[in-house]
Amino acid sequence: MNFVIFDDNKSENFYPLTLNRAIFDLRCGVLKLRQRIENLLDVEESYLIVADYLHNFYEEKHPDSKINMLPSDEITLINGRVLTQNQNYSLKEKISELRIGERLESNNQIVAAKLKAEEMTICSEMIEKFIIEKTTLKTDNDIFLFEYIWQMIHENGNLITKDFNDIFYLEDNLLQLEMGVTALNPYNIWIGEGASLKPGVVLDATEGPIVIDEGAIVMANSVIIGPVYIGKNTTIKALSKIYPNTSIGPVCKIGGEVEDTIISGYSNKQHEGFLGHSYLGEWINLGADTNNSDLKNNYKNVSVYFYPEKNKIDTNTRFMGTIIGDHSKTAINTSINTGTVIGLGCNIFGGSLVSGFLPCFTWGDNYNHHIYNWNKFIETASLVKLRRNLKIENSEKEVLKHIYQITNNK
């Protein structure tokens, strides 16, 4: 059986993070949504359905996957937004119950479908219509699909725990630590090959697991309280405080105080400052003493700018920080208000409280800004990636140019 993981028409719900990636490539827990589905179903060869403008970029980024094509065979299509398991269901069991020609929906959203396909090319803009035309309906409203970024932030700790139990937990775990490192509940800790923990580090896995991936460095006198995931080759700076429900992707440099936050990867928050209940993309740099608020002074629910409605909506939660798109930067001493959304490719400075919504490629702050010059943006983005011995390939540059044009009506 071939498994096909697809993006549907909800991509805009997760902007700015999904302007340049599929929803299923958002991290929540240790894994990305796609990786958790592939792990659950033992997927050997990935078929991925993305937006048409992401096709070339994904072919270059995922050379071992088939992008925007269906094989001539029996296939199972799976919505990349689905939460694979909770106390009410197992996605694997639900999929196994499907017959050829059936689709499974939850609350009027396609979860999965099983059908006999002919070899063809297709994209996420076409996939739902294709599935509906080829299948009959089966309903199970207990199955959960992510619809908003803040749901991922609040589910992150649970999924770190699930991923640890599914992938990293060893009953005969023989945790070996460097001299001067303190570990509480060591059976709840996994440390990858080549990771380094300096003297004075405290790993407190009493309330949840801690995964420190391969090549990561935790510098002296830092405290990590699980559930937490530290990605490959990421550095946690000295005296850092990483609180529960935090996932930090690969090749980041993180300092100060972080809690209930997801950082996708290749991003820096090296200095003091608080970051809480937030979701950051890649290639972001937060200047020294950048802080965000994640709780309003009146303790009411936080409203957040929602791209599909071009307006703020109630998140139904009192704790919500900031959402920041890829390639954005903040100056030193930047203060970010509760529920602020900062688009892709922004350069934020000016000294005022950053609040509400800043569109992609904003240069300045809420009160004094203009559109970031394209040539200057791509020059800086290229230099940033070069520092990690990477480059912006033409396919990625085309995606970023497309985003620049659609977000600035050019």
Image (cartoon, rainbow, N blue to C red):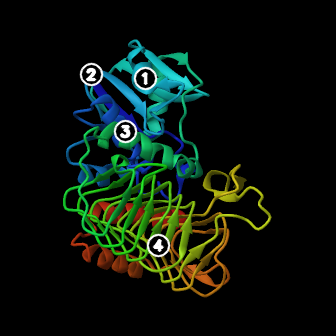
Label 4 with label 3: CB-CB less than 8 Å: no
In terms of sequence position, does the residue under pointer 4 or pointer 3 come before the other? Answer: 3
In terms of sequence position, does the residue under pointer 1 or pointer 2 come before the other? Answer: 2
**In the rendered image, which quarter is residue 139 located in?**
top right
Q: Amino acid at mark 1?
A: Ala
Q: Nearer the viewer, residue 13 or 43?
A: 43
Q: Secondary structure at mark 1?
A: strand
Structural distance between the alpha carbons of marks 3 and 1: 28 Å
Structural distance between the alpha carbons of marks 4 and 3: 34 Å
In terms of sequence position, does the residue under pointer 1 or pointer 4 come before the other? Answer: 1
Q: Is 123 rendered above or below residue 341?
A: above
User: Percent position (x, y) of residue 13?
Assistant: 57, 49
Q: Which mark is residue 113?
A: 1
Residue at image coords 46%, 40%: 125
Structural distance between the alpha carbons of marks 3 and 2: 27 Å
Residue corresponding to mark 4: 328
Structural distance between the alpha carbons of marks 2 and 4: 41 Å
Q: Amino acid at mark 4?
A: Ser
